[in-house]
Structures are given as structure tokens and as C-alpha cells.
């Protein structure tokens, strides 16, 4: 089926029971996305779960070959396996694929999109929002281009790169503190279990992380943890560099696993040959959609940003020892930030004029 501008904006969410899937559904509803129907799809263990969509009772359905029929958009928000096995079927049905799982991030088939940065990063070949064009020769011309909607760590890194592009920093270093919810509900349950058991002086389970994450900071997971800590860090750094390309300096990136459930915190160090004013830097971050704390306000925390759509920053401060160095502290609601980005991709496609 070829895509049509006149078809209803039927939406399918693959991985509807995952934390990301639930957040995508919530954002679609809160932003009044013009969806004629929202179909909730997932793996067999979640099939039949009663939930709601658009204010109406809804059941999570099984993922089959017919699941994508008449869909305008398909959000992949569950496991990478489900994305790998089903995204081409969704695309072949005429739907625009929006992947939140990272499977398409490094693929030449997909367009990586962060709409909040569009005012700073001009479009380049392979990064347009025209769903009728082909990402490369391997995709049939009449099929819609799939989109990769980056995770929160990548959005944070790209936002920093975009805000600083015109200042040409000598170096940029970003320390990311991801919450366990980046690894979905199983990781949240494991941190909760470890915390409870440690407070009760009982042995802890280390199933997902193969390490003690509660009351701890990790610079690496256990040997049995998949993906490995290094793979997570490498994928974030790769995707930031891929998106920034030649348009901005990609920051050096380090990762520390924090013992928190939600909220993606980070600290960034900036150094310049010729120092701009902190106010200029703050204006640059505001221009790419970041929220800057007002004078006298406390710095943002994982708790204070819950439910917020943007990256929140404390006031930018000079380093006490380096004359041209600055520090940034920021936090974002990780689930909300990635879900809003994905939905904004669909909103921009819906807003485009019909193809003549």
C-alpha cells in the first residue's frame, strides 16, 4: 500500500507496555495529536492487558503481519528485537516508522531527527522531513522514510553540540548520569528490590546489571550484563557524532550509572580559546529549547524536572581555576524527553502540505 496524505492518522505503538511505549501514548494524548485511532501492540506476555487509549478502554494486541494495516505512523518503543523484526513490515504497509529503540540510529536507511534543534542545524542530505523521499537506494521510492528518534543521552549531547556550535569551543566534555529506567521496567524493579533488601540486610539480586546499583555509582556493569556498559557509552557517543556531523564539535562523553529511577542528569565542561560571557551561552541554550534557571532559583534535580518536556539547566558558572572554562549542570525527564521528540517528528510530518 502506498502512503496517502488522505488516510487517517492511525497510530500504532509497538512495545506499548514498556516505559517508553506508555510515555509515547501519554504524550500523544496530552498534545492532542490528531490520531484517528491508537493501536497498542506488544509481545505475547503483555497481550490482553487492559489499558486505555484516547480516553477509551483498550487492550494490548498481539504483533502480527496485519498489525500495521492502515497505520500512518508506527512508533517502535519496546525491545530492539521487535524493531529489527518488524520495522520493514510497518514501512511496507505505508506507515512512517519512528524508532525510539536505537536500532535505526546508525542505519543509512533512516533519518535521525531532533526537531528542537532544527533552528540551529540546517537540513542536510539524508536528514529532511519529506516522507515521500527515499533515504537511500535500498528503499523503494514510494515507501516513507523511517525516522530514528534518539534517546535522552543522545538528545542531551546533540543539544550541547548545537548550542555551542557558533562559539567553536576548544573542548567539550559531558558526564552523563543515566537513570535505571533507561533499561525499562525490569531495571526499575531491580533497583527497587536491591534497595529494599540492602535496607533489610538481605542478599540482593543482580540480574540485569550484574552489579550492585543501589546506593552506588557504576563506571561499568558486571560481565553478564547485556548490553555492556561500554556498548551503551559507545552507542551514545557514536550517535551524537553522527548527528552533529561536520556542523558542530561532538563532545567527549563519559557515562556513570546513577542509582536513581528516573531523570537523566549530566555535567558538562566547556573550554574556549576566547571566553564568551555566561549570558551568551545561556541564550544559546535557550535558543535550542533548554530551560535556564532564573537568578536565585535552585539548580534542577531529577525530582523537579519530572513531567517536563525540556532539558533544564542551572545557571552556567565559570570554572574557578581555568580562565576560559565553564560548567553546566542539567537534568531532563528521560522518558518524557525522548517521547516528546518522537511525537514532534510525527507532528511535523502531519503539518506538511500535501504532495502534489
Image (cartoon, grey):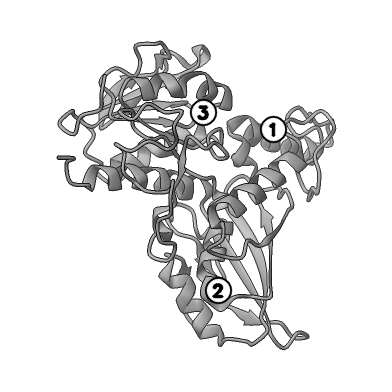
Residue 347 visible? The answer is yes
Q: Which residue is mark 1?
A: 190
Give the image location of residue 80, x and y in percent: 57, 27
Quadrant of the image occupied by residue 223 = top right
Q: Where does the C terminus fall, quadrant-wise?
A: top left
Residue at the location (48% across, 34% down)? Answer: 109
Question: 320 or 259: which is nearer to us?
Answer: 320
Q: Is residue 101 left or right of residue 1?
A: right
Where does the image place residue 206, in percent across and percent down from the top left? 79, 30
Q: For mark 2, does the 10 Å Cα neighbourhood hold few (<14), some (14 to 19), or many (20 or more) residues?
A: few
How far apart, in angstroms, are the residues tagged by discs 2 and 3? 35 Å
Marks 3 and 1 sit apart, C-alpha to C-alpha, by 18 Å
Q: Which residue is mark 2?
A: 298
- Disc 2 element: loop
**Quadrant housing residue 287:** bottom left
Mark 1–mark 2 distance (CA, rounded to whole Å): 31 Å
Residue 237 in the figure: left or right of residue 102: right
Position of residue 112 relative to residue 58, above or below, is below
Q: Residue at x 56, y 56 (%)?
A: 245
- For the N terminus, the quadrant is top left
Q: Position of residue 254 (x, y in %)?
A: 73, 55
Left or right of 23 on screen, residue 85:
right
Can you identify the residue that label 3 sits on? Answer: 78
Amino acid at each position: 500500500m502506498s502512503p496517502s496524505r488522505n488516510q487517517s492518522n492511525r497510530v500504532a505503538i509497538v512495545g506499548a507496555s514498556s516505559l517508553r511505549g506508555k510515555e509515547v501514548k501519554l504524550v500523544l494524548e496530552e498534545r492532542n495529536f490528531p490520531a484517528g485511532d491508537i493501536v497498542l501492540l506488544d509481545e505475547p506476555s503483555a497481550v490482553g492487558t487492559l489499558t486505555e487509549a484516547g480516553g477509551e478502554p483498550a487492550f494490548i494486541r498481539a504483533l502480527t503481519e496485519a498489525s500495521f494495516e492502515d497505520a500512518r505512523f508506527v512508533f517502535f518503543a519496546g525491545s530492539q528485537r521487535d524493531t529489527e523484526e518488524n520495522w520493514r513490515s510497518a514501512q511496507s504497509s505505508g506507515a512512517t516508522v519512528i524508532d525510539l529503540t536505537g536500532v535505526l540510529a546508525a542505519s543509512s536507511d533512516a533519518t535521525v531527527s531532533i526537531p528542537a534543534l532544527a533552528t540551529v542545524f540546517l537540513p542536510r542530505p539524508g536528514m529532511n522531513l519529506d516522507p515521500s523521499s527515499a533515504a537511500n537506494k535500498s528503499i523503494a521510492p514510494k515507501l516513507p522514510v523511517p525516522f530514528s528518534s534518539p534517546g535522552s543521552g543522545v538528545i542531551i549531547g546533540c543539544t550541547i553540540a548545537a548550542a555551542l556550535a557558533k562559539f567553536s569551543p576548544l573542548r567539550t566534555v559531558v558526564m552523563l548520569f543515566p537513570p535505571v529506567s533507561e533499561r525499562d521496567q525490569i531495571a526499575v524493579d531491580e533497583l527497587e528490590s536491591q534497595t529494599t533488601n540492602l535496607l533489610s540486610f538481605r542478599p540482593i539480586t543482580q540480574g540485569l546489571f550484574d552489579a550492585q546499583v543501589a546506593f552506588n555509582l557504576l563506571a561499568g556493569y558486571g560481565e553478564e550484563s547485556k548490553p555492556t556498559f561500554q556498548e551503551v557509552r559507545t552507542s551514545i557517543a557514536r550517535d551524537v557524532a553522527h548527528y552533529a556531523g561536520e556542523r558542530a564539535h561532538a563532545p567527549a562523553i563519559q557515562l556513570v550509572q546513577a542509582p536513581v529511577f528516573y531523570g537523566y542528569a549530566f555535567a558538562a565542561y566547556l573550554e574556549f580559546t576566547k571566553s564568551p560571557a555566561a549570558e551568551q551561552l545561556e541564550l544559546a541554550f535557550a535558543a535550542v529549547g533548554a530551560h535556564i534557571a532564573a537568578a536565585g532559583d535552585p539548580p534542577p534535580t531529577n525530582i523537579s524536572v519530572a513531567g517536563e518536556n525540556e532539558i533544564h539547566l542551572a545557571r552556567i558558572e565559570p570554572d574557578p581555576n581555568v580562565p576560559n572554562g565553564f560548567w553546566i549542570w542539567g537534568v531532563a525527564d528521560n522518558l518524557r524527553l525522548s517521547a516528546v521528540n518522537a511525537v514532534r517528528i510525527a507532528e511535523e510530518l502531519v503539518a506538511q502540505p500535501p504532495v502534489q
